């Protein structure tokens, strides 16, 4: 049973930083961060395969760092230089068999954590 619990969201001013955290229950999954705003499609931001290969989406490239602590079962997304357009609900995702990419949906998502930049 896959459990994903996000934390670390909040309100920041433009140019600020946040670190999002995701506690997950199982290893050996592709993990990633997504975001979705009302009326918009879910957008893949960053993914990490089980062997550590990282893909960063174009919309956040150069502003985010994805990392994972396998021992603690935590996935982190460090976001810097936040913009008003980054305001959204951010979700942690996990995928077991379907490939690891920001261009596709994952099989599992957490409940999300809100990020507001204003």
Image (spheres, grey):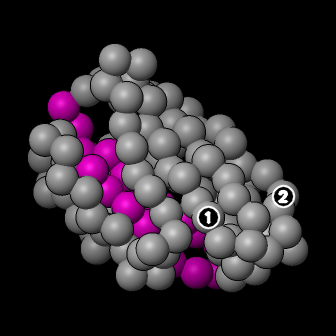
**In-front residue for pair 86/61:** 61
Which x, y percent locates residue 107? 31, 49
In the structure shown, which secondary structural element does the residue marked by tag 2 occupy? strand
Q: Residue at x 19, y 45 (%)?
A: 52
Left or right of 36: which side holds 47?
Answer: left
Mark 2 or 1, closer to the camera: 1
Which of pointers 2 and 1 lies earlier in the amino acid sequence? 2
**In-front residue for pair 96/81:** 81
Q: Is residue 41 above or below residue 32?
A: below
Q: Residue at x 56, y 39 (%)?
A: 21
Indicate yes or no whether the magenta region holds residue 30: yes
**Residue 30 sits in which quadrant?**
top left
Image quarter in which the N terminus is found: top left
Which x, y percent locates residue 26? 30, 24
Q: Residue at x 27, y 50 (%)?
A: 48
Q: Is residue 99 above or below residue 69?
A: below
**Residue 96 sits in which quadrant?**
top left
Residue identified by numbered label 1: 80
Indicate yes or no whether the magenta region holds residue 25: no
Which x, y percent locates residue 35? 54, 65
**In-front residue for pair 86/109:** 86
Magenta part of the chain: 28-48
Residue 30 marker: none
Left or right of 3: which side holds 97?
Answer: left
Residue identified by numbered label 2: 11
């Amino acid at each position: 049973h896959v459990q994903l619990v996000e934390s670390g969201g909040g309100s920041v001013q433009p140019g600020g930083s946040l670190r999002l955290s995701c506690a997950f229950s199982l290893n050996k999954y592709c993990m990633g961060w997504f975001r979705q705003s009302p009326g918009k499609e879910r957008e893949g931001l960053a993914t990490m395969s089980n062997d550590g290969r990282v893909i960063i989406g174009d919309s956040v490239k150069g502003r985010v760092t994805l990392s994972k602590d396998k021992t603690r079962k935590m996935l982190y997304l460090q976001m810097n230089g936040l913009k008003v357009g980054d305001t959204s609900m951010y979700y942690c995702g996990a995928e077991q068999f379907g490939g690891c990419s920001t261009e596709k949906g994952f099989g599992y998502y957490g409940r999300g954590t809100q990020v507001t930049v204003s």
